[in-house]
């Protein structure tokens, strides 16, 4: 357990950051799920709109340190390829 005032504060900050990061990661997953659901419907226009909404959200997660840059790039690339394949 934390003993010094600084380590107690750090423990509180870690809990707060964990909550923020969980919320952000959940939001990113929701946007990705919307793209995947749009892909399954087969409507390219809707899927493209969902992908365009998801991309900045994923990059925001990268800039905030929630997900790795290459992970976001890989997910965006694969989703874009799936959206493009709809015809």
Image (cartoon, grey):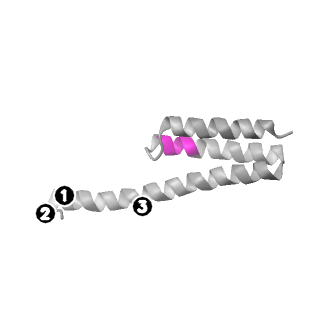
Q: Secondary structure at mark 2?
A: loop
Q: Judge the density around disc 2: few (<14), some (14-19), many (≥20) Cα neighbours within 10 Å.
A: few
Image disc number at residue 19: 3
Asked whether the residues under the numbered discs 2 and 3 touch, taking CB atoms below 8 Å apart as contact, a structural biologist would say no
x then y, percent, for residue 55: 62, 41
Q: Is residue 42 left or right of residue 65?
A: right
Q: Height in image: 78 above or below 37?
A: above
Image disc number at residue 43: none
Q: Is residue 77 left or right of residue 86?
A: left
Query: In which image quadrant can residue 15 be found?
Result: bottom left
Q: Is residue 56 left or right of residue 8?
A: right
Q: Secondary structure at mark 3?
A: helix
Read off the residue under disc 2.
Answer: 3
On the rendered image, what quadrant is the N terminus found in? bottom left
Instruction: Specify the farthest residue to the right.
Output: 87
x then y, percent, for residue 87: 87, 39
The residue sitting at 50% across, 45% down in the picture is 61
Secondary structure of the magenta portion, mostly?
helix
Asked whether the residues under the numbered discs 1 and 2 touch, taking CB atoms below 8 Å apart as contact, a structural biologist would say yes
Image disc number at residue 7: 1
Query: In which image quadrant can residue 26 be found?
Result: bottom right
- Please state the extent of the stretch shown in magenta in the rendering: 58-62
């Amino acid at each position: 357990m934390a003993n010094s005032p600084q380590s107690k504060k750090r423990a509180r900050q870690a809990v707060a950051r964990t909550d923020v990061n969980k919320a952000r990661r959940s939001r990113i997953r929701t946007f990705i799920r919307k793209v995947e659901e749009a892909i399954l419907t087969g409507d390219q226009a809707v899927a493209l709109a969902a992908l365009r909404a998801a991309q900045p959200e994923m990059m925001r997660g990268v800039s905030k340190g929630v997900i790795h840059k290459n992970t976001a790039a890989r997910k965006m690339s694969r989703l874009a390829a799936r959206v493009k394949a709809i015809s």
